[in-house]
Amino acid sequence: MTIKSETKKNKKPWPTKKAMEQVYTNKLWGSNTSTFYSGEGSHHPDIVNPYIESVTSFLTSFKDSLIVCDLGCGDFNVGKELVKFTHKYFAIDIVESLIEHNKVEFKIDHLEFKCLDISKDILPFADCVLIRQVLQHLSNNEVQNVVDKLSKYKYVILTEHLPQGNFTPNKDIISGQGTRLKKKSGLNILEPPFNFKIKEEKQLSSVVLNNNKGVIVTTLYQVF
């Protein structure tokens, strides 16, 4: 027992890229008829529809369409509903096989898929960034790396799966399929250690999940 315990304790976590590849290879977020499936958060109507409605309302409120950068686009079941309301749409994910699949599946003139590690790589220029249930899977160090890049965008639309009620924000985790919910925590990038500086914030949607499984909150931040 001691040997097994020590082995598990000293085992290094997989790099984020490898961990996310395993999510899709082993269908850790469930499966459907598609080769790639990003889970109920990208497919359940009760979760997806309020998000699409609120983000569409925001995108269509501008006279000139925005350039959008979708960080962690997943299987693109949600993103495909938003592309038509943009001037240019960059869809980014860390899993190369997923991005190659999406390039074949979704062909739109002003849509561009890119395989990037959002915590390490240079991100495309855009007016607005979408980050939907992505940061919740990353360690605080990787979240900080992403947050440091967000100040160059005018608008950030962030969606996070949070505990209901009061909670201690930003407890650290190992990057992977899990979230901070098991620690009764969730991300708030305005709070320490991230302290993201914004001009304004507005909640766009909030979906309370059944069986006390938390709430999915989408917030619009105007950065400058």
Image (cartoon, rainbow, N blue to C red):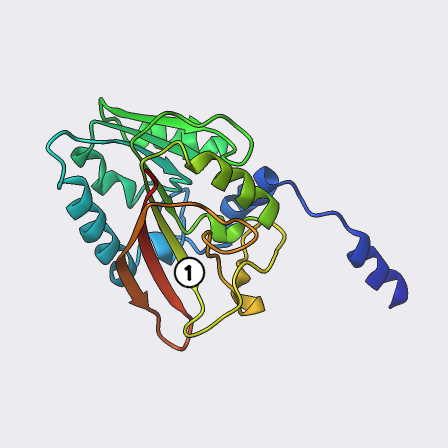
- Relative horizontal placement of residue 138, taking residue 44 as reference (left or right): right
Q: Residues within 10 Å of mark 1 (few under 14, many from 20)?
A: many
- Relative horizontal placement of residue 195, taking residue 131 as reference (left or right): right
Q: Quadrant of the C terminus?
A: top left
Q: Quadrant of the N terminus?
A: bottom right
Residue 31: percent from left, percent from top:
41, 53
Residue at screen point 57% across, 42% down: 142
Front residue of this view, candidates 156 and 93: 156
**Extreme-left residue of the structure:** 63
Residue 50: percent from left, percent from top:
22, 57
Amino acid type assigned to the residue bearing label 1 in the image: His
Residue 56: percent from left, percent from top:
18, 45
- Quadrant assignment, res 69: top left
Residue at screen point 22% across, 40% down: 82
Front residue of this view, candidates 165 and 221: 221
**Extreme-top residue of the structure:** 109
**Extreme-bottom residue of the structure:** 211
Residue at screen point 67% across, 44% down: 14
In the image, residue 70 sits, relative to residue 38, either above or below, namely: above
Residue 119: percent from left, percent from top:
53, 36
Residue identified by numbered label 1: 161
Mark 1, secondary structure of its residue: strand
- Relative horizontal placement of residue 121, taking residue 71 as reference (left or right): right
